[in-house]
Image (spheres, helix red, strand yellow):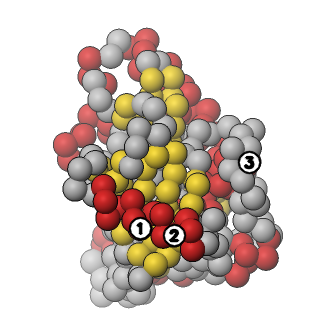
Amino acid sequence: MSSSQTGPPCSPSTALLGISEPVNGNFLYRYSTLLAIKLLWRIRPRNGNVLMLTDRLCVKYESYIHLSEVSTMRFIAQHTSIPVPKVLCAFTHSGRTYIVMERIKGDIIGSGWVERSENSKAKLLSQLTERVCEMRKLQPPEGTRVASVDGGSLFDCRVPGPSLRFGPFDNLQDFHRHLRMGIEFDSRLGPEPQELIKQQSKSWPLVFTHGDLSSLNILVRGDDVVGIIDWGTAGWYPSYWEYTTAYQVNPQKSFWVNEVDKFLQPMPGELAMERIR
């Protein structure tokens, strides 16, 4: 297990209350972070909402980022061997959350994937399978619901609703009702909505889920997986969620769809259910 994160990843009390706490969020760290962004944002490279401060440090910041992402990375580092960025500082200021973390040296797995040998691909996908198995062995605290690692709200820009954050939900029925925007069963509905509601009435165990295992969020060096990043969509979800979200790939990275079944348990029935939704 990794112990690279300092401090408790999340205590039972905060997990039940849905509280995500800052990390080294005192005035000095906050001021230094904001000053560094002001001085460097024009001259240092960016990757989406991540600014590369140095070759070893980066800062992720935006209004929709939440401190629960920090809690998730610390939780994963504490309880698994999955390589995640070490968080040095995290806080919220003027409606934005800032996460300063170490940069993991590696390339996204999609870079040059089609040119890799089948043996190289198999090695990487086997390691991904092992990482997912580690997540599946994590046991949710008693009373856990469909929620973030802290027991609070979730984030996924692919889920409809008035806000990018949603939940938490006390049960799967409430979660699925949110996914279909409150629609209840009615005999006047078409066959597909009726089938969707019927399928969503089934039961699945809650498992810890990354929620966006795309080719953009897995870092490799050679034939080794050296990092899994971007944990903003993670939380306790029904067991099919990892599989169905992995299929929602960036259109420019469509090749990844052909690999999903090789590192995640195929769940064709649940995938069909989600496609109806």
Image quarter in which the N terminus is found = top right
Q: Position of residue 140 (x, y in %)?
A: 73, 62
Q: Is residue 245 left or right of residue 136?
A: left
Mark 1 residue type = Leu
Residue on which the image places disc 2: 30
Q: Are marks 2 and 3 in contact (CB under 8 Å)?
A: no
Q: Which of the two discs, 2 and 3, labels the residue nearer the N terminus? A: 2
- Per the model, the C-alpha gap separating discs 2 and 1 is 6 Å
Q: Amino acid at mark 2?
A: Arg
Q: Which mark is residue 34?
A: 1
Q: Is residue 7 left or right of residue 107?
A: right
- Residue at screen point 75% across, 58% down: 7
The span from disc 2 to disc 3 (Cα, nearest Å) is 28 Å
Count of number-bearing discs: 3
Kindly identify which residue carries mark 3: 79
Q: Is residue 140 visible?
A: no
Query: Which residue lies at the image location 19% right of the left edge and 43% below the top edge?
Result: 252
Q: Amino acid at mark 3?
A: His
Helix, strand or loop at disc 2? helix
